[in-house]
Image: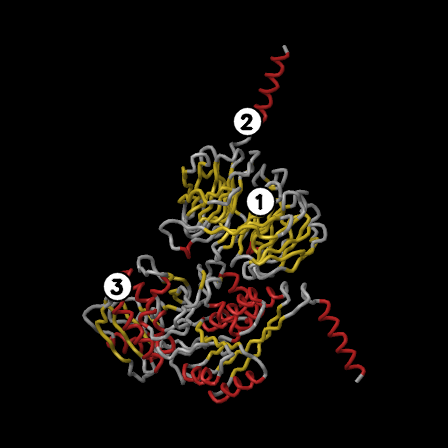
Amino acid sequence: MSLLSRTVAVTLITVAGTAPLQADSLDVRIGYLQWIPDQGPVLSNVIPEPEDAGLRGAELAIGDNSTTGKFLGQSYSLQSEVAESEEAAIAAFDAMRSSGIELFVVNAPSGTLAAITENAGESTLIFNAGAKDDALRTGQCHVNLLHTLPSYSMLTDALGQWLNQRRWNEVFLITGPTEADKGWADAFRRSAKRFGLEIVEDKPWTFDADLRRTASKELPLFTQASDYDAVVVADVRGDFGEYVPFNTWLPRPVVGTQGMSPVTWHRVVESWGAAQLQNRFRDLAGRDMNSEDYAAWAAIRAIGTAVTDLNSDSPADIRNFLFSDKFQLAAFKGRKLTFRNWNGQLRQPIPLIHPRGLVARAPFEGFLHPNTEMDTLGYDRPESECRING
Amino acid sequence: MKTLLKQSALAAMIGLSTPALASVAYVSNEKDNTLSVIDTETREVIETIDVGQRPRGILLSKDFTKLYICASDDDTVQVLDLATRKIIDTLPSGEDPEQFSLHPNNRHLYIANEDDAIVTVVDVETKDVLAQIDVGIEPEGMAVSPDGKWAVNTSETTSMLHWINTETFEIEKNIVIGQRPRHVEFSKDSKIAWASAEIGGTVHIIDVDNLEQVHEMTFKVPGVNQDRVQPVGIELTSDGNYAFVALGPSNHVAVVDARTYEVLDYLLVGARVWQLDLDKDEKHLYTTNGVSGDVSVIDVEAMKVIKSIKVGRYPWGVVIDPTS
């Protein structure tokens, strides 16, 4: 017993020794919730996706915030829960809520996110770092829900602009069977219309053969058409898409969810100081930073930027700040990022990458917008029913 | 007789200085691992020197005999002997040195270690690490006031200026400024510090006596999207008349009245203009343009860009040796 209290005393001294420069202190508590449903078996499982995607980005941002906070008497802590089911995710959310946490980053499918948001009550602020569904940005918005992950349409608009400026206007679209594949493909069809692309073939992927052995035989036949400039693949979970490049009927590039892809983040992004973020992340996680990591990181950095200015962790104050002219997030994408005030989406440039290099970065010059060219990506205000700020 | 003597003395002096080359500018090429040496008379690259990996910040010793080079990916500071243009030494630098600044005592080198959130102070003579100071995330800009009292570090992700007392090596004040602060430049009298915030798009004027911001500048380049106006390097004329601010991917340099903080003009240079330096008589300003891989030369009197010089890939820093 006396040994225990001595340990406590020692701990206290250590804390006092590294106390912040300013006496008053504010502890900002943030909850991170993750639930990723099983993707089912995929053909292309050579390079598995990391299971802690998102979580490690959140951890990095907590560290970044804390380094800033130590000069201002502010500290940050993360409570994280990687749940095994939707029910478990919602239960974890409720438990965190009752423990007093009001700021959340959620990396989960849109259904789970909606259930959590419904339960949230007024004094919470939730950042979506896992669901790309356009419906969350065009109709099913919530006053206290912000999105740091781009929507499908932001990604496909980036691709659409790129195809347009390359003048590769005729495309062959292959869509996988999942809801996510359909969401991605719907977004692409809209982008095609916006950017003057013609979908010369629009084919669903229905094959159930193992393409590791037969891709070279099946795909040339599947992609037969008189002509097209590029093949666009909508295969979000990475089932068959990796086998499309180099197996097309015509010698054409493959873009979309495989081949050259529009993404939130990727290890090949290194400009604008991104190399430093990539290094920091690699030191922390022992792997490369991906899109979910970036979205979670950006959410917690947005909170940190607000707290630095406000010296308050009230969700209402933070929300007001994030939608004010004062907010701008420096997030290694070459320009300041801000939130769209109608639906809470973080505006951001979209890198177009192949696995070992950066190809381009949208938005491209020449796609004009009356307010900001960043709003040429995704649903613009007049196209969205959401008005979360009135 | 007397006149004759004087004349010959003068001739001797001229004689002494002529063997030296015309004034040269050194440019670090971040993605080529080289320095380009530019003859400022002919404005041509006369030599390319291999250096360590990812050279970024460069600066001259106070006696102009050495050039220090941050070789970021080699985690070292290299020392180039200017007479022979050979790397003669390396200094301990901490990890990933990006920018640095030399104290007027010509010994204490303050190095921003970008990956480690630390400022390392090294004695360049003994190579001793005198201090490592915890600062914010991604320390970048580094400046020591000409009077030697303050070392200022900017931390990009923390968006702060950290004011380090050069006697105690302790931080005495932190000032939050715009997003992603990149560079600090002191006025010659050490009374005013200029700090650029790249993503904020602002330049912050700090009164050094009170350590308070007295002014915040914004820029509007005609025909350029506001998002692309990203202040980075700053250079001040010693007469206190002008400040030049490199505005990154807007591809312009702002000319500022250094007394009223009014922008007088925007000069179009190469793509993604980064750092800048004035030549000895302050008649020409050299800018590094990272994306276009060249250096622009601005005639300060005419306020016109008169030449662009092709250098290596991603030129980062530029310094002009005033004695050469």
Residue A20 position within the rendered picture, expressed as x and y whole percent measured from the top left: 67, 66
**Residue that badge 2 annotates:** B18
* Mark 3: amino acid: Trp
Residue A206 position within the rendered picture, expressed as x and y whole percent measured from the top left: 28, 83
Q: CA distance from mark 3 to mark 1?
A: 48 Å
**Residue that badge 1 annotates:** B59
Q: CA distance from mark 2 to mark 1?
A: 24 Å
Query: Same chain, marks 2 and 1?
Result: yes
> What residue is drawn where x is 31% and y is 64%?
A161
Residue A383 position within the rendered picture, expressed as x and y whole percent measured from the top left: 31, 71
> What residue is drawn where x is 27% and y is 65%?
A195
The nearer-to-camera label among 2 and 1 is 1
Q: On the rendered image, what quadrant is the N terminus of chain B found in?
A: top right
Q: Residues within 10 Å of mark 3 (few under 14, many from 20)?
A: some
User: Residue A168, which numbered label?
Assistant: 3
Task: Label 1, secondary structure: give it.
Answer: strand
Query: Which residue appears farthest toward the bottom when viewing the image?
Result: A87
Q: Quadrant of residue A265?
A: bottom left
Query: Which residue appears farthest toward the front when viewing the image?
Result: A390
Q: On the rendered image, what quadrant is the C terminus of chain B found in?
A: top right
Q: Residues within 10 Å of mark 2 (few under 14, many from 20)?
A: few
Q: Quadrant of residue B67?
A: top right
> Dots 2 and 3: beta carbons under 8 Å?
no
